[in-house]
Image (cartoon, coloured by chain):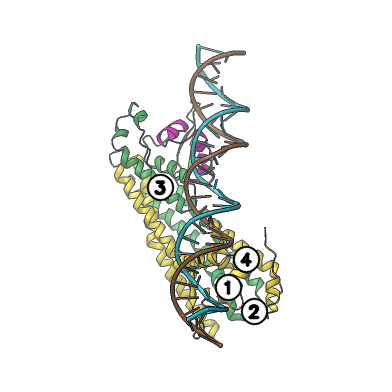
Chain colours: A green, B yellow, C brown, D cyan
Amino acid sequence: MLALELSNVTDSSEELNQKQPFEQMHFVEEVGLMFELVGLPRMSGRIFGWLLISNPPQQSHGELAEVLQASKGSISTMTRLLIQIGLIERVSLPGERRDYFQIKPNAWSQMTKQRMAQIIAFRQLAEKGLDLIKDMPSPLQQRLQEMRDIHAFLERELPLLDERWELEQKQSMLHKSH
Amino acid sequence: MLALELSNVTDSSEELNQKQPFEQMHFVEEVGLMFELVGLPRMSGRIFGWLLISNPPQQSHGELAEVLQASKGSISTMTRLLIQIGLIERVSLPGERRDYFQIKPNAWSQMTKQRMAQIIAFRQLAEKGLDLIKDMPSPLQQRLQEMRDIHAFLERELPLLDERWELEQKQSMLHKSH
DNA sequence: CTAAATGTTCAGTAAACATTGAACAAACCG
DNA sequence: CGGTTTGTTCAATGTTTACTGAACATTTAG
């Protein structure tokens, strides 16, 4: 399964990159599988995985295609997707016509926002359902009330949790910089 | 797209069920789509959706197959899946050989547990990655540190959030029962 | 201008997945 | 004992989806 045609990488000037290509590719593949588990295309996960460990962190379209053994089209589509959901960003170095991609600094907070959209949708669905069975005896409505309430709860609490995270993050930064 | 062969339902003794079959089936379909969005089979979502609004809340294998216009095999496979991930449960009434399914009382807390497994996997992946690039200059490690830290944070905080939810839940129960 | 390099879009395909339907098993009843 | 109801398993089908590769832009350089 793992593509092993890495000879092209070897003749690059960077020698360190070649030190553990096996483990690196394995890591990339694992991130791909995790993304699949979360409902995203595997290839988008591979790209993200490589951008997590690549040196330098900026990688061009072509480099991605070569390292991941994927077609240009795939890279183009998947980078667009990753940008759209806020996990990576484009960096265009001045004077270069090539585009580079890198992990977005607060990529994971973005994922939380994605999740919030789902939670809201679930709460709204629950309310829709409750409206449908509003004439049934009250105990029968409990299932949907629980669904509505827990999502309303999360809708309220997750943003607060995110704030706390950003606060903790900033504070630990201060410790280090000192 | 929506299957409209509901004549079989009509001749059931329950008249109320027939009042809004359109909206009901639409609701069922929407839950199906949400499940798909979260990475679960659409049919499992349909079953779950129907169990959210069905009267009575317990539905037999056969009833599910009829209402959802699905094959016995599909129902069997999908109910097994839903039971495995903790969203529904089997209830076998004494003296009945038929099995019934219903929404599990704390179904949504179960989903949180599912999510915890993902979060743990992501943290572990981040640590694996950090080990791979431990010789790179420290700023390059930031991407993976952030990934590790936020998941460690969630790993710590989500269970606490869940506890608070259960607490709030119990208290609002007391209010009602009085 | 042409030629080369970089990117995107899109039709086609190959693989994955849900779903069906039939064959099989088990429990119950006459 | 059949025969009926209920439920599972599994091979075959149909659909969806990721991925490729080629055709089509766009930019830069000579």
Give the class, few, some or many, for how many residues have Cα within 10 Å of label 1's Cα (few <14, many ≥20).
Answer: some
Horizontal and vertical percent for residue A9? Answer: 36, 30
Counting residues from the start of the chain, the first of labels 2 and 3 encountered is: 3
Q: Which mark is residue B62?
A: 1
Going 49% across and 52% down the picture, which residue do you hit? Answer: A39
Q: Which residues are magenta?
A: A59-87
Under circle 3, the secondary element is helix
Horizontal and vertical percent for residue A102? Answer: 44, 38
Q: CA distance from mark 1 to mark 3?
A: 41 Å
Q: Which residue is mark 4?
A: B69
Question: Mark 2 belongs to which amino acid?
Answer: Met
Q: Which residue is mark 2?
A: A136
Asked whether B172 falls inside the magenta stretch, the response is: no
Going 46% across and 50% down the picture, which residue do you hit? Answer: A36
Q: Which mark is residue A31?
A: 3
Counting residues from the start of the chain, the first of labels 1 and 4 encountered is: 1
Horizontal and vertical percent for residue B127? Answer: 32, 49
Residue A95 visible? The answer is: no
Task: Identify the subunit bearing mark 2.
Answer: A
Q: CA distance from mark 2 to mark 3?
A: 47 Å
CB atoms of marks 1 and 3 within 8 Å: no
Q: CA distance from mark 1 to mark 2?
A: 23 Å
Q: CA distance from mark 3 to mark 4?
A: 38 Å
* Above or below, B131 relative to B99: above
Q: Which mark is residue A33?
A: none
Going 46% across and 56% down the picture, which residue do you hit? Answer: A163
* Above or below, A23 relative to B148: above
Asked whether A80 falls inside the magenta stretch, the response is: yes
Give the class, few, some or many, for how many residues have Cα within 10 Å of label 2's Cα (few <14, many ≥20).
Answer: some
